[in-house]
Image (cartoon, grey):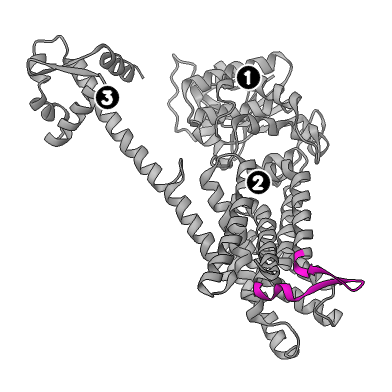
Amino acid sequence: MTQPQLEIQAIAVVTAIACALPGVFLVLRRVALLSDAISHSILLGIVLAFFVAGSVTSPLLIVGAAAMGLITVVLVQALTRTKLVANDAAIGLVFPALFSIAVVLIARYSGDVHLDTDVVLLGELAFAPFERLVIAGYDMGPQSLYLMGGILLLNFAGLLLFYKELKLATFDAALAAALGFSPALVHFGLMGMVSVTAVGAFDAVGSILVVALMIAPPATAYLLTDRLPSMIAGSALIGAAAAIGGYWLAHLLDASIAGSIATVLGAMFAVAFALAPQRGLIAVARRRGRQRWEFARTMLAIHLLNHEGLPEAADENRVEHLKDGLGWDGDFTAEVVKQAKRNGLLWEGEGALILTDSGRRLAESAVAA
Amino acid sequence: MTSFTLAAGQVLIHGRPYAEQERQVAYVPQRGSVDWDFPTTVLDVVMMGRYGTIGWMRRPGGKERALALEALAKVGMQAYADRQISQLSGGQQQRVFVARSLVQDASVFLMDEPFQGVDATTERAIVLLLQDLRASGKTVVVVHHDLQTVADYFDWVTLLNVRRIASGPVHEVFTEENVRLAYGGRVAWLKTEPAATTGSTTAR
């Protein structure tokens, strides 16, 4: 592996983890699309800050962008609160407006500067190693690695310090308020985190990948676990794995790195969606199937118990009469009887089905419940 | 509580404004107010009731854990401590919320329809708990709609229908006439049984 290859992967991994941390709470709060809104509207903050500072490297750009991210959240909330538009519509109204103002401003006033809407949207990881951090003549590595590393540390520290508050305000905002943890403060803290992360990340990976990195890893981890700490750790791991996997996929296909990472993220989600041990489509379908047969076996046992010891038992409890008694078709009945025999619930004597002790217990406990 | 806007009037807790007394009040919301698919355990939800006492940035520890387990035992849910909350029935969810209010060290409990759609076990567990709370000098205010149980469960009743219809000790205020006023006449009042009402009720 060459050094630029290593550097690109390092930037991608650090960015992925930095995005996944606040992303977990966006997904749990069901405001995932705010990341889309923020990552676009920050462009207006960057453009306006650029007009003030007159340079694309000024730290004022980050401040301006983060401020615009928060303004976006405030505007969306204000619109939603009027109850005249729903939350999703409010998001769809606010950020395209802010973003388009930025696009017009760039086209009109800063045609010569390095502020290019394509780069903003799609980013270009391959170019990230070109911008070096040079201190006293020494090459310290790519700038964006330091920027994203700093943001990752910030997010990690925020999460560590305010884990309890984030969890409480996300799960039950009313209780948070009653206990003195202002949910609005926690919300804006989180949104500030998202804005700063989006600003740092969009330069390296583009705002579309920022959204993918914030939403896809937590959404995938959510399917795989039911504990918050493992969802957070899982999101970070999934993001990092997709970053590395996506890099090599791009290498293989000679395609865009950001696009390949987003593709891998999508594929990982699809796999979890189908195969997750508890919540995946297949697990759910199997559980449903199992419950169906379990229920049928119990019904059979109850039916046999009801007629047990009565004069009609020899008749009612014959296999060929079950379909009248229970309304089942022949194949289904045969399969249920076969399973019930295998499970030791009943045995067949003189053409009639007879419950074993364990079959009787099953029927009795089912009736009692 | 702070998330409600006052339409009129004021809220006094032990004679002082609610804003000064927030921590004296434990609120048990309706079950539907939170996302039960949230990735956390029963014990963790109950421990959230302690967060106010712990304060910003500090982590809950062994003491909080012990208090939460104790509260879970009081509502008969200690066996479920490590369960994912999505695996609970409606009645169990309600008991978790009640357990969470118990660890808050509050002196006033506000419960919003705690008996709504719960199983008999849960209803019994909560009623026993209300009696415990009353015995230890706490005030419990319950929003309640089951007229049959008012006289059994509560000492004090306030009947509401847009405005306050009546308020006072159950044996004085909980009369056929008041209940009719509260329900606009559409109520079957059976003389033989202790029937009927709505409103909020204090066991104190």
Residue A192 visible within the image = yes
**Percent position (x, y) of residue B55?**
81, 37
Q: Farthest residue toward the right?
A: A136
Is B34 or A329 nearer to us in this picture?
A329
**Residue A139 counted in the magenta span:** yes
**Percent position (x, y) of residue B108?**
72, 27
* Residue A77 picture quarter: bottom right
Which residue is located at x 70 percent, y 64 percent?
A: A11
Labels in figure, total: 3
Q: Say which amino acid is labelled 3.
A: Thr
Give the Cα distance between marks 1 and 2. 29 Å
Which residue is label 2 attached to?
A170
Q: Earlier in the sequence, mark 2 or mark 3?
A: 2
Output the chain of dot 2.
A
Which residue is label 3 attached to?
A298
**Percent position (x, y) of residue A123?**
65, 74
Is B54 or B14 nearer to us in this picture?
B54
